[in-house]
Image: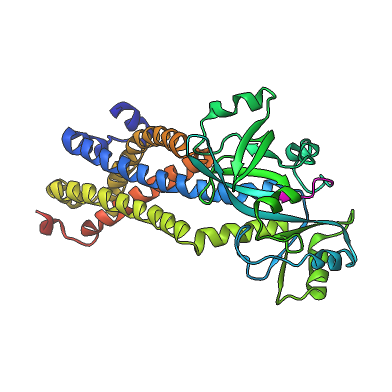
Amino acid sequence: MSGVLAALFGRLPIGWLQLTHSRTRFAAALAGVSFATILVFMQLGILGALNQSTIAPYDHFRADIMISSEDANTLTDGGNVARTRLFQALGVPGVAEGAPILIGDLVLQMPDGSSSSLQTFGLNVTDARFVSPETASQMDLLRQENHALIDTATRGIPAEAFDGLLAGSPFPFEIQGTTLTAVGTLQVGGGFTADGTLFVSEQTFLRTSPNRAAGAPSHILLNVDEGADPAIVVERLRATLPMDAVKVQTLKDAAAADLAYQTTERPTGIIFGFGVVIGIIVGIVIVYQVLSTDVADHLKEYATFKAMGYGQTFFLGIVLEEALVLAIFGFIPGLLVSLGLYAGMSSLTGLPVAMTPDRIAMVFVGTVAACALSGAIATRRLAAANPADLF
């Protein structure tokens, strides 16, 4: 390794030799950097799972515009929308078609007494234009009373429970005292608000949710005329509909607003965001302590170099070399451990925790930057000191 670094830096790798001189201290430093890396990876992983589970429901639908209650911050909170808003919207130039959707949380009860919460969507099964192709291909199956499409990745239900369904046999289950029959499948998985997803017809939804009414859907989806600009149609709708009662956004903007609310205003998102910051601070402090101790241990050598005419950039280069070594050699085990933790967390919780190349690159760059910052701070004592003061 010394030869590789010597070729890379074009000089004797002083920083590497200083770090590896005490192998115990070097191992402890790498463990500290790895710990900080794991902490950041885990917080980002959970935050990423929150983001993905927030956006996932929007992927079920194919629409340009969504009308929601004025107090709705997410897809599932806020009040309902009067169905008359759909008919008003259809009279606005540029609006081609519309459909209401009903959303609620229902509890699936298994024969063994276990249960799972399902984010349930009630749809107009006669119109498949507003749902994803996967769902549209199975919409006809929902025309029959109490039929459903169920999420085979639902948390809390063994995967083998759906073996018969996947083979073509119906899967009966109980919801709110009503027996439903799953005749089709989805693959979504659990999130932070529900264990899985369920698609049913409007009529089936209303049977299982007697406190809901067909005249008050959760949202209204709209598609615009071919060639029309959704943003312009949104402005027309805002000028027509009572904005003290409804909120009109493009579906893309609604998803972005939902994500921003979950990550910046809901406690869960804020906590995980702080966790990332804390992980970075922990890494900076650990590396700073290692490098500042190393600088203190070699003050006489640095004083000799300074008396010989070497400037601050030389010392900074040595310490940054040490920071780079710590960043690289500490990042690799941190990444490997995080990959194992991601797999375990995803398996145990059903959350969409997955490592991505972008995340790996971001954390690596952040690790190098944090170590470099720590190194720069650790050399500040050498900047203005006289050589005699360092002996």
> In which image quadrant can residue 159 be found?
top right
Q: Residue at x 83, y 65 (%)?
A: 233
Is residue 123 in the magenta section?
yes
- What's the magenta bit mostly, secondary-structure-wise? loop
Q: Which residue is drawn at 31% across and 49% down?
A: 283
- Work out whether residue 39 or residue 146 is closer to the camera in this orientation and state it: 146
Residue ranking furthest to the top = 167
> In which image quadrant can residue 13 be found?
top left
Is residue 96 in the magenta section?
no
- Work out whether residue 370 or residue 39 is closer to the camera in this orientation and state it: 39
> In this image, 113 relative to 317: left or right?
right
> In this image, 343 relative to 98: left or right?
left
Q: Residue 227's spot in the image, x, y percent?
A: 89, 55
Q: Residue 301's spot in the image, x, y percent?
A: 15, 45
- Magenta residues, as a range? 122-126
> In this image, 169 relative to 88: left or right?
left
Q: Residue at x 50, y 64 (%)?
A: 265
Residue 196 appears in the figure: yes
Q: Residue 82's spot in the image, x, y percent?
A: 75, 67
